[in-house]
Amino acid sequence: MISKRTEEMTSFIVMDVLERANEMEREGIHIVHLEVGEPDFDTPVCVKNEACRALEDGHTHYTHSLGLFELREAICEYYLSNYGVSIDPDQVIVTSGSSPAIFLVFSALLEPGDEVIISDPHYACYPNFIKFVQGQPVTIPVYEEDGFQYRPESIKEKLTTKTKAIFINSPSNPTGNLLSADRMQQIAALTQCEQYPYIVSDEIYLGLVYEGKEHSILEFTDHAFVLNGFSKLFAMTGLRLGYVISPKAFVRPMQKLQQNFFISANSMVQKAGIAALKEADQDVARMKEIYDKRRRFMISRLKEIGFGITVEPTGAFYVFANARHISEDSYKLAFDILEKAHVGVAPGIDFGPNGEGYLRFSYANSLENIKEGMNRLEKYLKG
Ligand SMILES: Cc1ncc(COP(=O)(O)O)c(C=O)c1O
């Protein structure tokens, strides 16, 4: 018998779209992939070289369960130079991607029935992480006209004696929008209320911001857990490296979880992570410049062919466009676009009920492919 909580877990619909697209590709059909949230760029050479060197130098064994001290120090230096926040290596736990980091934080933080506030739409996997450790996701709709930013007063209304955390994700997947400093400040102020909730801030898209100033939650409060990783900014998805920056009291409890469940992150990849933080600036700048060109192009083409974009996204590599005039059923629409126009897109419903009627387009693909995808979409819409 499969356990109830595994049975109850929903699939990641965008992966279903991708798998169907791969099936069509095997039949010889050319697909333009705008569904996947994965950098199309090669991993920076300095990172690959360091990984190879580390392998040759024998970095093939377990490391300290918190991660290599040198990497934890490099993470602290990175946060200090980019966001002006001073953290201690003793607050950093290195993980095999930010996904295990999410698991560690909620495992350490939640008792059965404890509530975690998340926005709707949100990254598809958040509710599953929370429910798997018997927590209760409490969703707050966020709206296109606000640039899908939380209204801090809506969060306040949902706080109960069971609220343990407020989850934020800026820049956001799926919307590509950022929380303004002002709203971040107001959300941080909520940690001072009676329930004393923590902020859990998924900062995996920090660095990929094309307009305006980006912020870490740690600039506003230290009553927070930061989740971050190397997958997106450094195009290292398959290398699996991430981390948590945690209040000190939670480090030892999470270390015990890490020791039991994961032992340590991959040792040679940790060495490569140090190179990413210290040597990949120019690679990141180059990728960012290209993402920005694609972003501008995609936004203008999507608007031209009739999709609704009220507040233009300025971060990550997504455009979350209103498609209600075409269909209220984003799941059906995404698969219809795939079958008829041969373009992979992510249905808004994957990101929560309030995402229904939207489609998420990823510009982690070449400008040439994006142009082709937009042309195919235009033709599809003209019927
Ligand atoms: C918002 C967000 N958080 C976390 C992750 C997981 O990233 P990883 O486990 O590769 O670090 C993703 C991946 O798409 C994401 O979009």
Image: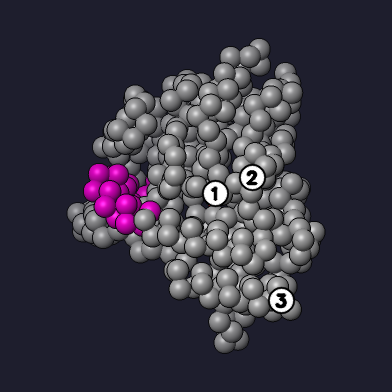
Predominant SS of the magenta segment: helix
Q: Please provide the residue range marked out in magenta.
A: 265-288
Q: Pick whichever of labels 3 and 1 is earlier in the sequence.
A: 1
Above or below for 318 versus 304: above
Is residue 351 in view? yes
Residue named by callout 3: 382
Q: Nearer the viewer, residue 314 or 59?
A: 314
Residue 122 image label? 2
* Structural distance between the alpha carbons of marks 3 and 2: 31 Å
Which callout, 1 or 2, points to the residue nearer the camera? Answer: 1
Which callout, 3 or 1, points to the residue nearer the camera? Answer: 3
Quadrant of residue 303 in the image? Answer: bottom right
Badge 2 amino acid = His
Q: Nearer the viewer, residue 347 or 19?
A: 347
Residue extending furthest toward the right: 328
* Structural distance between the alpha carbons of marks 3 and 1: 26 Å
Q: Position of residue 171 (x, y in %)?
A: 51, 43
Q: Position of residue 185 (x, y in %)?
A: 53, 23
Q: Nearer the viewer, residue 55 or 208?
A: 208
Give the residue at x 25% y 44%: 278
Residue named by callout 1: 313
Disc 3 vs disc 2: Cβ atoms closer than 8 Å?
A: no
Which callout, 3 or 2, points to the residue nearer the camera? Answer: 3
Disc 1 vs disc 2: Cβ atoms closer than 8 Å?
A: no
Badge 3 amino acid = Lys
Left or right: where 151 falls relative to 60: right
Left or right: where 46 falls relative to 29: left
Q: Position of residue 54 (x, y in %)?
A: 24, 54
